[in-house]
Amino acid sequence: MIGEILKKISNPADLKELSLAQLEQIAKEIRSFLLETVAHTGGHLAPNLGVVELTLALHTVFNTPEDQLIWDVGHQSYVHKLLTGRLDKFETLRQYQGLSGFPKPEESIYDSFATGHSTTSISAGLGMAKARDLMGKDYKVISIIGDGSMTGGMAFEALNHLGHLQTDMIVVLNDNEMSISKNVGALSRYLNRLRMNPRLRRLKYDVQDLIQKIPRVGRATVRYLEKMEDLLTYMLIPGMFFEELGISYLGPINGHDISELMMAMRNAIIRKGPVMIHVLTTKGKGYELAEQNPSKFHGTGPFQLDNGQKIGNSSLSYTDIFGATLVELAQLDQRIVAITAAMTDGTGLVEFSKKFPERFFDVGIAEEHAVTMAAGLAKQGIRPVVAIYSTFFQRAYDQILHDICLQKLPVVLMLDRAGIVGSDGPTHHGVFDLSFLRHIPNLTVMSPKDENEFRDMIYTALHHNLPIAIRYPRRDGLSDAKRKFNLVPLGQAEVLREGQQVALFAVGTMVQTALEAAVKLQKMAINCTVVNARFIKPLDQKLILELAQKHQYLITIEENVIAGGFGSAVAEFLAEQEITGVSLKILGLPDFFITQGPTELLLAQAGLDADGISHTVRELMLPLVGVGVR
């Protein structure tokens, strides 16, 4: 149910007419509405419950959309969407053709910049602020970044440059001491000291007031008092790290006190140069289950409000199977270590971190560092396994190429969430990894057809002295994983079904789909050979040549973009061998960013379901056997 005040808000200008009491009431209404809606649709609940008052204050003080708000990562922008004319569409959140779960400029003029990956907001904000200055305009630029994102190097690159340029810009540090996984690193400890000493936040202003109240005195005394202020500041004042970068620091501020937030923002507006407002919030605020377990409710599917239990299939996912398998193998080999980038829970490594705390490293949102650290570990005889979502591995391309593969170091790269990931949409679909990995020398790339083969691939990767990447989907397994491990022959594909005329070479998730298509086609008197490719690199060249001689059509099928993927590799090989007498058809994802929506629907639209594959085969075979098309 939409609250009485909330339903009257058509745009942020309406907030400026509300009293403080009304703003506090609308905060309660927003939390209630968020809980009801996200429990039904799924989404990023805990981050948004934590920024209700912060978002209200931002839109009340600043004049959006003229003033530019840039939300880092963007998964905490739900309240922003509610206040900017999208209340009536909010039940379509993360649904097909509905509202995006992240800021999307095509969706609203209030979404200043598209964000889905972390640590980008300060860089984007600085660029927008400099553009403002170059064009002689005077709007405000405000980047909102979480303390979890402050574990990423890009944020510090931007802060360093911002302090150097002294551009008028506001950075709001939303500090909830909790990203997706528990924050790590020296900065996290530094921010924690600020949280533990909230009374110190007023000390600087007390010192300044004291000096200003002293009657006119000699110049030397003034200089002495100023030096004393600086000394006290260095010793006691929070935020000196940022002050030393040339960024004025305000805080820590209670992120659930609208009045205090608005006062700090108005203070920031009148200052020259860059300003950081340090805001303390509680992730999951107002929903006890989310406050107690913010990781569980960071990103969630539909759930029951009364107990927080998820609605839907409870089968083990590939992520779960990876975590359990790595624990099993680590018990047998003390050299095995696990590394992730602020995704301990998301990559299934919670149990590993508990059983082997000395062999587990969460490096924060620092994918580049994670990969090169793994290279260093491998160089000294350790067997590192790096588990990161496919879409975030994109950030570490150079480190994979230069630091691991150039030196042929035995690092295992686990690419979770490969392929279509459904409601998270284009910023999170892992559909480019085959293309950016397969051309790197010395790297073996494989993808399992099911969870049993997945376990065998992890086992195999740790038994070879090679850089190996394994990509796997955000889905549940098909059956119970077996206990026994078997080595998978490197570079060897697997024929699952014998046929004539058409050979289907399928990768990973597409293997089961290809088998289903083959069953459909058999009913039409078309018998297909079905191959589980297993390896994207190296290709099973012997099998490709053999089947090219026996079949008129080879069809490659992959849940990856067509450009540069598995099908491209097969095409390059056939061209190099000057193979004639066989036609190649490549099935994969098209050359545009895939929207959000149910995975099955998105795959069907790309022709990557059983019906789509059988339709393609029937069209190819029509001149030969006269089979009708659907």
Image (cartoon, rainbow, N blue to C red):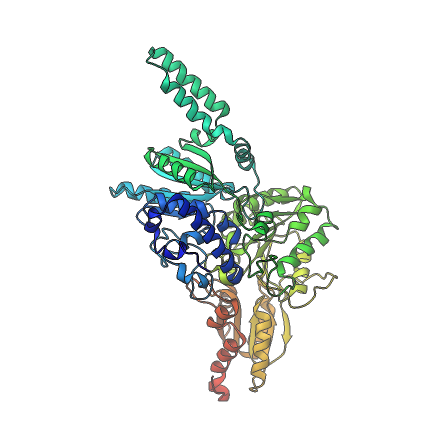
Q: Within the image, what quadrant is residue 21 found in?
A: top left
Q: Position of residue 297 (x, y in %)?
A: 56, 53
What's the residue at 50%, 29% (across, down)? 199
Q: Position of residue 247 (x, y in %)?
A: 40, 33
Q: Is residue 500 at all visible to an observer of this figure?
A: no
Q: Is residue 160 at all visible to an observer of this figure?
A: yes
Q: Position of residue 388 (x, y in %)?
A: 56, 52
- Of 476 and 327, which appears nearest the observer? 476
- Of 363 and 71, which appears nearest the observer? 71
Residue 507 vs 230, above or below: the answer is below
Q: Position of residue 628 (x, y in %)?
A: 48, 87
Looking at the image, which residue sits at the far bottom?
626
Q: How many marks?
A: 0
Residue 76 vs 278, above or below: the answer is below
Q: Within the image, what quadrant is residue 468 found in?
A: bottom right
What's the residue at 61%, 47% (across, down)? 339
- On screen, residue 310 versus residue 45, left or right, reads right
